[in-house]
Image (cartoon, coloured by chain):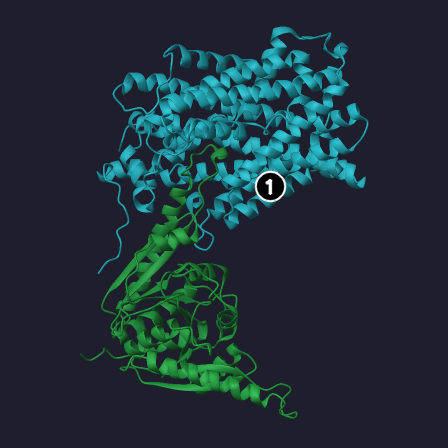
Chain colours: A green, B cyan
């Protein structure tokens, strides 16, 4: 399998290379780094923009040369310039050609360092990709030997996350990473005017947590029955009045990747970021992989048939 | 099996309460961040606007212009009870309603009575406020578009309608918001308070033009009795002052700030109420109040002879009463939630929807009951029922303070009632005096309701009580915190 890494021809984005390398190193996949340049328009007429096209391709190739220099040596990577009407379309085509297991893109430069920020490319991918989409926080870096140490699956306690959990478990088992189910309790403080105390929400949250922990335990029990299951299984709950607080409430480690499922209301095959998932993505301090439901199902099936890793 | 006496008197372990709310939810320790000024604003914001928009049409016919003294009386009693409430709240290191405090200090039986009062207070006041909202909405529609909702759809059956539809719609809207997990933020709350104050200021300033001393000539047509009776009806407009007490845990220097904040909020609120009332009773004869709908707005229209001030006032009332209804229904569901967790009501009431993280079934049940009340029962009855629920809850709290001083004198209290034992005794006397002047039917309905609650307790709560079960299992002392799955 292959990871498609989107690399902007301006050559500025290192984060997706680092994430791509970290993922590829962990799963043993190879990487295709793609720089997308626009196709001539209108197509075929007079070639008035031939020079411009040539310049674009040259710039992209130069960028790829830089990318080649930055790519760690232990990962097998190819570099290619793709022609497409738009960057997301080019990446999607590349992903289809290579039957990619994921598309890796960076954060928009408009966002703050350390958080995932969706730009026009990632936003479009998150609504149309058939393959999982991996997003880096802005400025993401990792040391040349970093592997995925733990996969955190965002767990909402409803049955549409079942496949996601098993899929994440399968990937975790394959890469030797731990699996953690994380849930987030985001509740504003109770209105003081209600006269029931400022902490009236806490018992409600506590009840929800009890319930979610119980479902998380069943989900993990299912994972334990897999022949190949991840070395560590845990759960975590983040509390906060805002999503940012809730995500900060959980501890994150180096080499951690957060996996988020696609919304149940979107199309089955494609990624569709729900309102909550999108809030989780935006506030995540670690790279996020958004998995469409169909891909999650496929991965879950694979995980159920997988044999334990040797060695 | 525990004896009845043990059952009625069993108390909830404070440690368990803390574990239930704090330990497993992360944010257990709240910093003391609320200062005197902010606390006073809480009090003013929570109190103003629930009653003053709708209560004059019920209170003035009972007392005449002397109704301004009713406000002073009701305010004084409300202040005394709020101070007692603050002591009880500070003795129990968890945040909650008077139900939680009663459970921790006075036992299960009393807690059930307090719960009955609170359910009545919240449920009925939500209904009363929704009916008031419907009046102002009608006024607003009439002024803006010349459109009146027909009587059959905007009045309770007793007043010649079929159903008060706007009130029901308001409750449904609030319910949908609560199910989605909306909760009024501090900022929204501040805006709402400003709107309420602005609207009342508008009324006072413009209403002064209609000052006619002749209207005040028959100052107290029904004497002292009328004044006390009206105080009972008005008490309802001081609900919310006790919200200050529930914030006790987060207040800086509570010993000083708590009574000061209650007192300052009381003075501010009473001054505003009296200003509004004085302008109102001077603008039209007492007899004109009877049955007047959207009272403040109607008076303003008569006085100024133009509709825009009335329209502005009605719009302000529609916005701010909406937020009050939302918050009251919210409080109601959270009290039922606490009761559900204690096993006093069926577990259905503490079921949380995993998707929205809100207690959906309990919110829907509450909404249905309140909708029925608001749709079918006239407002004056609702206002009185709210008052009696609140008064009895406060009565119990005031008695509780005295009981607790005797039974647990060493219990650490963040705040102690100044002037003990005079303050709680005055508070108790004030509550009783106001209660006995309410209409007989109100008291009868209340007694009936409490009896129903107690019957419920004897046949259901007593046997399903969570601490009862834990006693039986011999593990009352340790409350199990769900362990994390770590392997």
The answer to whether one can see residue B291 in this image is no
Left or right for A154, reference B134: left
Q: Position of residue A95 (x, y in %)?
A: 45, 82
**Residue at far left of view:** A311
Q: Position of residue B306 (x, y in %)?
A: 81, 30
The residue depicted at 32 percent of the width and 75 percent of the height is: A23
Splitting the image into 4 quarters, where does residue B65 fall? top right
Secondary element at tag 1: helix
Left or right for A92, reference A162: right
The residue depicted at 72 percent of the width and 10 percent of the height is: B216
Q: What residue is shown with label 1?
A: B171
The residue depicted at 34 percent of the width and 73 percent of the height is: A18
Left or right for A288, reference B375: left
Splitting the image into 4 quarters, where does residue A304 fall? bottom left
The relative height of residue A249 versus residue B242 in the rendered view (above or below) is: below
Q: Position of residue B387 (x, y in %)?
A: 55, 23
Question: Disc 1 is attached to a residue of which chain?
Answer: B
Which quadrant is home to the N terminus of chain B?
top left
Which quadrant is home to the C terminus of chain B?
bottom left
Splitting the image into 4 quarters, where does residue B291 fall? top right
The answer to whether one can see residue A92 in this image is yes
Q: Position of residue A19 (x, y in %)?
A: 35, 72
Which of the two residues, A10 or B340, is positioned nearer the viewer here?
Answer: A10
């Amino acid at each position: 399998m292959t990871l498609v890494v989107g690399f902007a021809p301006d050559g500025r984005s290192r984060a997706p290379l680092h994430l791509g390398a970290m993922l590829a190193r962990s799963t043993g996949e190879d990487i295709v780094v793609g720089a997308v340049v626009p196709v001539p328009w209108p197509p075929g007429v007079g070639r008035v923009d031939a020079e411009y096209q040539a310049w674009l391709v040259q710039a992209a190739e130069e960028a790829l040369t830089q990318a080649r220099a930055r790519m760690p040596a232990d990962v097998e990577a190819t570099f290619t310039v793709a022609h497409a009407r738009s960057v997301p379309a080019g990446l999607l085509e590349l992903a289809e050609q290579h039957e990619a297991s994921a598309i890796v893109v960076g954060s928009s430069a408009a966002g703050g360092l350390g958080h995932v920020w969706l730009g026009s490319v990632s936003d479009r991918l998150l609504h149309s990709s058939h393959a999982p989409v991996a997003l880096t926080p802005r400025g993401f870096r990792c040391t040349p030997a970093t592997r995925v140490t733990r996969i955190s699956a965002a767990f909402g306690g409803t049955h549409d996350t079942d496949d996601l959990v098993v899929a994440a478990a399968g990937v975790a088992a394959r890469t030797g990473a731990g699996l953690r189910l994380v849930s987030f309790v985001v509740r504003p403080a109770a209105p003081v005017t209600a006269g029931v105390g400022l902490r009236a929400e806490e018992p409600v949250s506590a009840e929800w947590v009890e319930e979610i922990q119980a479902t998380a335990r069943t989900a993990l029990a299912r994972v334990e029955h897999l022949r190949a299951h991840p070395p560590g299984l845990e759960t975590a709950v983040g509390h906060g009045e805002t999503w940012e607080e809730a995500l900060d409430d959980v501890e994150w480690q180096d080499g951690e990747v957060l996996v988020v499922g696609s919304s149940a209301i979107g199309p089955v095959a494609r990624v569709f970021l729900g309102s909550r998932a999108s809030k989780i993505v935006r506030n995540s301090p670690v790279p996020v992989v958004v998995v469409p439901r169909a891909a999650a199902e496929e991965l879950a099936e694979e995980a159920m048939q997988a044999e334990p890793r040797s060695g | 099996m525990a004896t009845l006496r043990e059952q009625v008197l069993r108390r909830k372990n404070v440690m368990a309460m803390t574990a239930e709310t704090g330990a497993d939810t992360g944010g257990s320790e709240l910093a003391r961040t609320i200062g005197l000024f902010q606390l006073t604003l809480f009090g003013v914001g929570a109190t103003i606007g629930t009653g003053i928009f709708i209560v004059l049409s019920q209170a003035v016919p009972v007392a005449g212009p002397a109704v301004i003294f009713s406000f002073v009386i009701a305010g004084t009693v409300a202040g005394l009870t709020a101070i007692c409430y603050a002591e009880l709240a500070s003795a129990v290191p968890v945040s909650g309603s008077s139900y939680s405090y009663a459970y921790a200090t006075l036992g299960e039986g009393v807690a059930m009575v307090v719960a009955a009062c609170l359910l009545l207070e919240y449920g009925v006041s939500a209904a009363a406020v929704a009916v008031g909202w419907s009046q102002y909405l009608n006024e607003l529609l009439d002024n803006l578009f010349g459109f009146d909702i027909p009587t059959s759809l905007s009045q309770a059956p007793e007043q010649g309608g079929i159903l008060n539809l706007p009130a029901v719609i308001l409750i449904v809207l609030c319910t949908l918001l609560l199910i989605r997990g909306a909760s009024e933020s501090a900022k929204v709350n501040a805006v709402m308070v400003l709107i309420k104050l602005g609207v009342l200021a508008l009324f006072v300033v413009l209403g002064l033009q209609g000052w006619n001393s002749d209207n005040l000539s028959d100052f107290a047509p029904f004497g002292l009795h009328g004044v006390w009776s009206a105080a009972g009806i008005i008490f309802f407009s001081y609900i919310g002052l006790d919200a200050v007490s529930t914030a006790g845990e987060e207040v800086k220097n509570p010993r000083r700030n708590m009574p000061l904040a209650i007192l300052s909020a009381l003075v501010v609120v009473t001054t505003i109420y009296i200003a509004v009332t004085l302008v109102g009773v001077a603008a039209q004869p007492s007899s004109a109040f009877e049955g007047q709908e959207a009272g403040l707005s109607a008076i303003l229209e008569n006085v100024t002879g133009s509709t825009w001030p009335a329209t502005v006032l009605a719009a302000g009332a529609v916005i701010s009463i909406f937020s009050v209804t939302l918050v009251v229904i919210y409080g109601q569901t959270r009290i039922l939630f606490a009761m559900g967790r204690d096993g006093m009501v069926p577990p259905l009431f503490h079921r949380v929807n995993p998707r929205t993280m809100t207690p959906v079934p309990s919110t829907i049940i509450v909404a249905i009951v309140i909708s029925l009340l608001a749709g079918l029962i006239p407002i004056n009855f609702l206002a009185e029922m709210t008052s009696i629920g609140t008064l009895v809850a406060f009565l119990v709290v005031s008695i509780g303070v005295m009981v607790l001083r005797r039974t647990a004198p060493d219990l650490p209290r963040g705040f102690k009632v100044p002037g003990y034992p005079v303050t709680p005794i005055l508070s108790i006397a004030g509550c009783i005096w106001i209660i006995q002047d309410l209409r007989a039917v109100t008291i009868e309905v209340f007694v009936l309701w409490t009896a129903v609650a107690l019957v419920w307790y004897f046949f259901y709560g007593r046997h399903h009580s969570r601490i009862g079960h834990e006693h039986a299992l011999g593990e009352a002392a340790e409350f199990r915190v769900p362990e994390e799955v770590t392997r």
